[in-house]
Image (cartoon, rainbow, N blue to C red):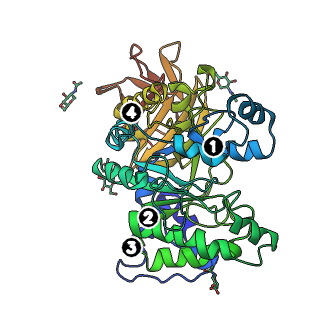
Amino acid sequence: MRAACFLPALCLSLLQVGAPPGAAARYTADWASLDARPLPPWFDEAKVGIFVHWGVFSVPGFGRFSEWFWCWWKQKRAAEVDFMKKYYPPGFEYADFAHEFRAEFFDADNWAEIFKASGARYVVFTSKHHEGFTNWPSPTSWNWNSMDVGPHRDLVGELAAAIRKKSLHFGLYHSLYEWFNPLFLADQASGFKTQNFVAEKALPELMDLVKTYKPDLIWSDGDWEATDAYWNSTQFLAWLYNDSPIKDVVVTNDRWGKGCYCKHGGYYNCADRYTPGELPDHKWEKCQSIDTLSWGYRRNMKLPEVMDLPAIIKDMVYVVAMGGNYLLNIGPMSDGMIAPVFEERLRGLGVWLGINGEAIYSSKPWRVQKENSTLPVWYTARNNTVYAIFLDWPSKQSLQLPAPKMSGATTVTLLDNPNVSLKWAPLTPTAGLVVMMPLMPASPGNAWCLKLEGVV
Ligand SMILES: *[C@@H]1O[C@H](CO)[C@@H](O)[C@H](O)[C@H]1NC(C)=O
Ligand SMILES: *[C@@H]1O[C@H](CO)[C@@H](O)[C@H](O)[C@H]1NC(C)=O
Ligand SMILES: *[C@@H]1O[C@H](CO)[C@@H](O)[C@H](O)[C@H]1NC(C)=O
Ligand SMILES: *[C@@H]1O[C@H](CO)[C@@H](O)[C@H](O)[C@H]1NC(C)=O
């Protein structure tokens, strides 16, 4: 049902004739049942989210994909081994970094203000990455959580409260596996015949997060070493969808065990930075990091490695035109500061969305997602309005749009200047428009949007 429901026209009709609210379906612990759950509508409407990777890995804050620092070091990747040899005494363990994770300047309200200003509608925060350190006082993560060591604060709780004050949806990233957890390693050594790590750590923590923080989204990860049967993913999801306090609003992704992604769960992430070439028939999300070389903060990050605002907008527009959500990542510093370069990108995105957001939020893919005539143009649609987004200004002051079919009632405006109708002429007798463009308005992200009313 949801696969069909993803397409715009079908979606409306199915929603109208679908099960009446209140006649709550019970889900069973199998993929056929769980995969049929309709995605709560807030997620597709939101379109833009902010991903936040923060943990003990933010302390070394070093190397490509710094959130994997511990693993790289143990696997003897040269950069991390040299770094540790040079700057840390013999015997220094990864766990010792936790004492330097102090979050001195962490102000959840300041983060929430920045995220709100970015135009994002949801935030996904690492409750626990593969290192196993929990950013909340987990009772099953003794001495390896943000209350016992390091910040001595409930980071998840503080951020949840601040995000909700700004009316944003709050989501939690959760890694199922932990690289070096002895319970996990023992289960692994048994060929995953034993499930002690799942019973004593992974499931209790997931349920604790759900009950304590009531996240609107669970972004599962770290699933790939073992099957969903080992993780008891279908049992957990059946509980989540039937009986948890967030059963009606919670959205999940697709990383619930080896072979699950792009196939089972809620929306699809598929692989990191999934970039489909054709319109997928299932709701999806692309996660992308502003620092192209890491999700966690890197103190050795250089400007050319950082996406600029036009690159971010271009990527987001492509994703939304293809029916996806865009989850844009930042890695805060271990002291709780968001690097000004990230903050500047996020605020710039918000300025652009402030002008052009009606083409993004709650939009649906149009019958054509992209075409290339005068310039490459991406289309989105909302109700009967079609939006044409372009990432360069046409040099001849006219823009050809071959796909839309005009009518007597067709009007064309630029979202930067919505009160002025633009002149247009038919491109051919049956289809297409040639739009006479005004003088180029300054754009915060070098991308503009035409609003086409009365076209099909
Ligand atoms: C996993 O699910 C099976 C089947 O329902 C159940 O017997 C088992 O106890 C569960 N394991 C854990 C760790 O919850
Ligand atoms: C699309 O248009 C651009 C010019 O804006 C051109 O460089 C590019 O080659 C075109 N691509 C295709 C596939 O036609
Ligand atoms: C789009 O249509 C829906 C109902 O189908 C309506 O609630 C909504 O206000 C409309 N939005 C706009 C921008 O016209
Ligand atoms: C556009 O029109 C609306 C409604 O008529 C008006 O409130 C608004 O001030 C106008 N905006 C500009 C930029 O002229």
Nearer the viewer's eye, disc 4 or disc 1? 1
Q: Which residue matches tag 4?
A: 350
Cα distance between the residues tagged 4 and 2: 24 Å
What is the x, y in percent for residue 96? 60, 45
For ligand 2, the image quadrant comes to: top right
User: Helix, strand, or loop for circle 3?
Assistant: loop
Cα distance between the residues tagged 4 and 3: 32 Å
Q: Which disc is residue 40 wearing?
A: 2
Type of amino acid under label 2: Pro
Q: Earlier in the sequence, mark 3 or mark 1?
A: 1
Q: Is mark 2 within 8 Å of ligand 3?
A: no
Q: Which residue matches tag 1?
A: 67
Type of amino acid under label 1: Glu
Q: Residue at x 81, y 41 (%)?
A: 76
Cβ–Cβ under 8 Å for marks 2 and 3:
no
Whether residue 25 is visible here, answered yes or no, is: yes
Q: How packed is label 1: few (under 14 Cα within 10 Å), some, or many (20 or more)?
A: many
Q: Residue at x 68, y 71 (%)?
A: 228
User: Helix, strand, or loop for circle 2?
Assistant: loop
Which corner quadrant holds the N terminus?
bottom right
Q: Which residue matches tag 3?
A: 245
